[in-house]
Image (spheres, helix red, strand yellow):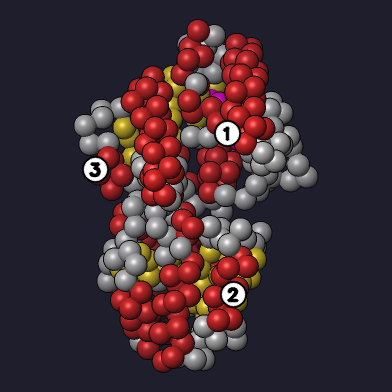
Amino acid sequence: MKIAYCTDTLWHPGGIQSATIAKADALAAMAGNEVWIVTTECPQASTVLPVSDKVHVVALRVDYYADDWKSKLLLLKSLIVNRKRHRRQLANFLRETRPDVVISTGTSEKFFLPRLRRVCSAVFIREMHFTKYYRRLASQGLAGQLAARLAEFWDYHICIRRYDRIVVLTEEDRERYWKKNRKVTVIPDPLTRPAPVPSGSPSKSVLTAGRFVHQKNHASLIRAWQQVHAVHPDWSLTIYGEGGLRADLQMQIVGAGLDGSVRLAGYSDDLLSRLSEGAIFVLTSLYEGFGMVITEAMSCGLPVVSYACPCGPKDIISDGEDGFLVPVGDETRLSERICELIENEGLRKRMGAAALEKSRQYSLDRIIPMWMALFKQ
């Protein structure tokens, strides 16, 4: 079977990039499959994960992001000129390669990919890596909300209807937003690499990871940590990631008198090793598509305390068994759950063992057969 993934980049760290590479590698390793990943951005020194020699990587060099940050005029150029270039180059690729299955990862190509049936008689699949109404959840102000709703209308009432199948990452997302759509299938993101064996040495470290952006809501975690720190000053909070809110978060930490307890550790290219050094993982996102970092933390034997945001945590975490779910924004409850795990080592270890067992449900060995079954169907 000839399978083509379409995405923006493999060179910037993120869940879409990691999951796409892991799935492409596993599919290419199966007898009878030939796999391509088609990107829009120029190649850089290395991809976010190593790509198998069996996977063909094609860089179209559309470079959407080369100029669009400079001005609104250049952003408009990116949306019009570059998208036209992207569509033409992708059509040429499909005409020459003739894949059986073409998958949009929900990046630049999602708006026009099924229109290319005229050059390729493949099955077209759309992956949803965010909860359906992520634009609305991410936007702020009246203008932002209006723009989000217009984009949602164009995407979900016009563009997405042309796909043969839609894949969402959680049962919650399907039941909440796609229940009446028979094209929708649930396939979770896989764990992309094996976790290191935990050191077993006692740790007094609570960890989280995610870009320093509004969606990840780190400011809420820092406020909750003030309550934890007041009771357990010997424990620390480490936040892995980078982003535009770094200066604001650092100012918040200093202003709260937590600069000796909370550390912004930056981006790590070996996050699993860092996670294996912790005792508890916390997620305070306002929304997710899945929350791959939750399964990664579980694979390191960490119990997870998470806001029950849409969508992902409620699919992955069994509340009270392998972690705790907390209503979004309830910082007092969040701090209480963290303290409960800090104060009860036996509970922490039991939940960590249950989390490790739960993580095995997301291994590539379990996820890839779900994709092959969908392709064959």
Which tag, 2 or 3, sits closer to the chain's start? 3
Horizontal and vertical percent for residue 206? Answer: 49, 77
Q: Report the amino acid beneath label 3.
A: Glu
Q: Report the amino acid beneath label 2.
A: Met
56 sits to left or right of 186: right
Which tag, 2 or 1, sits closer to the chain's start? 1
Horizontal and vertical percent for residue 175? Answer: 24, 43
Identify the mark at residue 7; answer none if there is no mark.
1
Q: Which residues are magenta?
A: 3-8
Question: Is 350 located above or below residue 10 in the figure?
Answer: below
56 sits to left or right of 110: right
Is residue 51 among the parts visible in the rendering? Answer: no
Identify the mark at residue 175; answer none if there is no mark.
3
The local crowd at label 2, few if under 14, some if 14 to 19, many if 20 or more residues have their Cα within 10 Å, is: few
Question: Is 233 located above or below residue 88 in the figure?
Answer: below
Camera-side residue of 154 and 88? 154
